[in-house]
Image (tube, rainbow, N blue to C red):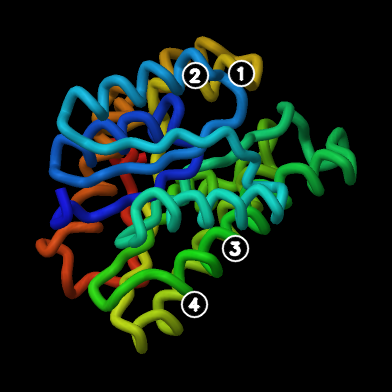
């Protein structure tokens, strides 16, 4: 349908990104999303969004590669001819490590994906987004908690995302584009298992005031709200989705 807005979600094949894709489709968006490598999970996400009535474009792309980012946006242009919103969800934790255990290679990999990849996507999006468009960056509560003893490199990268969100919100306001972030806490996704800590959410739930981990769908609700008219006077916000932790 010509009146459906178009949303691009990076890292949309699974986890929080997939939840955003599914919910956006149900809320009336057509959706493009990138995925890094799990084609089977991406196909499941694509099928679910199509079943909700959306036109869907799934693209295998690494946001750490500037050429892949440019190709992604070109593909969105060709398929939809418009872009109304961007959700920067693609990101990596890197291996568990203290500062002393971490290497320059780990820092470079994490920062290239989580920060420089996000920057490249924001640049491309701002060249296309109309007045009333929006960007939501998926950051992390790790940016405030510091990640010490686990993923200090990841936490530092998300601190950069928070600062970028605040600064870019001020720049993008001139063209009527809002920029916000969500800061998920302990969320039940595959991220923890991929980092070698599959029991992390259950183990740390006692430290959460609401006494449980969150779901990807709860994060997606916050993302879609920030893109909605209900949040029309909100920009530069960092919204914790963390059960109070």
Q: Which tag, 4 or 3, sits closer to the chain's start?
A: 3
Q: Nearer the viewer, residue 94 or 25?
A: 25
Toward the front, the furthest residue is 78
Q: Which tag, 2 or 3, sits closer to the chain's start?
A: 3
Residue that numbered label 4 is attached to: 167
Vertical order, 142 against 35 (above or below): below
Residue that numbered label 2 is attached to: 190
Residue that numbered label 3 is attached to: 119
Question: Is the residue under label 2 in contact with that under label 1 (CB below 8 Å)?
Answer: yes
Identify the element where label 3 is drawn.
helix
Q: Nearer the viewer, residue 173 or 84?
A: 84
What residue sits 44% from the left and 54% below the top?
78
Query: Residue 223: horizontal and vertical position, in percent?
Result: 28, 48
Q: Nearer the viewer, residue 93 or 150?
A: 93
What residue sits 77% from the left and 43% below the top?
109
Toward the left, the furthest residue is 230
Identify the element where label 4 is drawn.
helix
Identify the element where label 2 is drawn.
loop
Question: Is the residue under label 1 in contact with that under label 4 (CB below 8 Å)?
Answer: no
Cα distance between the residues tagged 1 and 2: 6 Å
Indicate which label's residue lies in the foreground, 2 or 3: 3
Cα distance between the residues tagged 2 and 3: 25 Å
Cα distance between the residues tagged 4 and 3: 12 Å
Horizontal side, residue 216 vs residue 138: left or right: left
Q: Which tag, 4 or 1, sits closer to the chain's start?
A: 4
Residue that numbered label 1 is attached to: 194
Cα distance between the residues tagged 3 and 1: 24 Å
What residue sits 14% from the left and 44% below the top?
28
- Residue 63 visible in the current orientation: yes
Indicate which label's residue lies in the foreground, 3 or 1: 3
Cα distance between the residues tagged 4 and 1: 31 Å
- Residue 238 visible in the current orientation: no
């Amino acid at each position: 349908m010509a009146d459906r807005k178009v949303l691009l979600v990076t890292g949309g094949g699974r986890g929080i990104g997939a939840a955003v894709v599914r919910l956006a489709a149900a809320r009336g968006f057509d959706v493009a999303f990138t995925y890094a490598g799990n084609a089977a999970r991406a196909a499941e996400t694509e099928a679910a969004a199509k079943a909700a009535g959306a036109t869907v474009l799934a693209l295998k792309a690494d946001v750490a590669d500037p050429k892949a980012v440019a190709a992604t946006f070109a593909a969105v242009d060709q398929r939809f001819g418009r872009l109304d919103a961007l959700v920067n969800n693609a990101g990596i934790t890197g291996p568990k490590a203290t500062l002393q255990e971490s290497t320059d290679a780990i820092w470079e990999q994490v920062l290239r994906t989580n920060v420089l990849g996000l920057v490249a996507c924001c640049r491309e999006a701002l060249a296309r987004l109309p007045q009333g468009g929006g960007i939501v960056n998926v950051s992390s509560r790790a940016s405030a908690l510091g990640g010490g003893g686990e993923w200090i490199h990841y936490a530092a990268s998300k601190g950069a995302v928070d600062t970028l969100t605040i600064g870019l919100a001020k720049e993008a306001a001139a063209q009527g584009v809002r920029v916000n972030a969500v800061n998920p806490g302990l969320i039940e996704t595959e991220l923890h298992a991929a980092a070698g800590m599959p029991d992390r959410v259950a183990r740390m739930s006692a430290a959460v005031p609401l006494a449980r981990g969150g779901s990807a769908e709860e994060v997606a609700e916050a993302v879609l709200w920030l893109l909605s008219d209900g949040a029309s006077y909100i920009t530069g916000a960092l919204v914790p989705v963390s059960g109070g932790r």
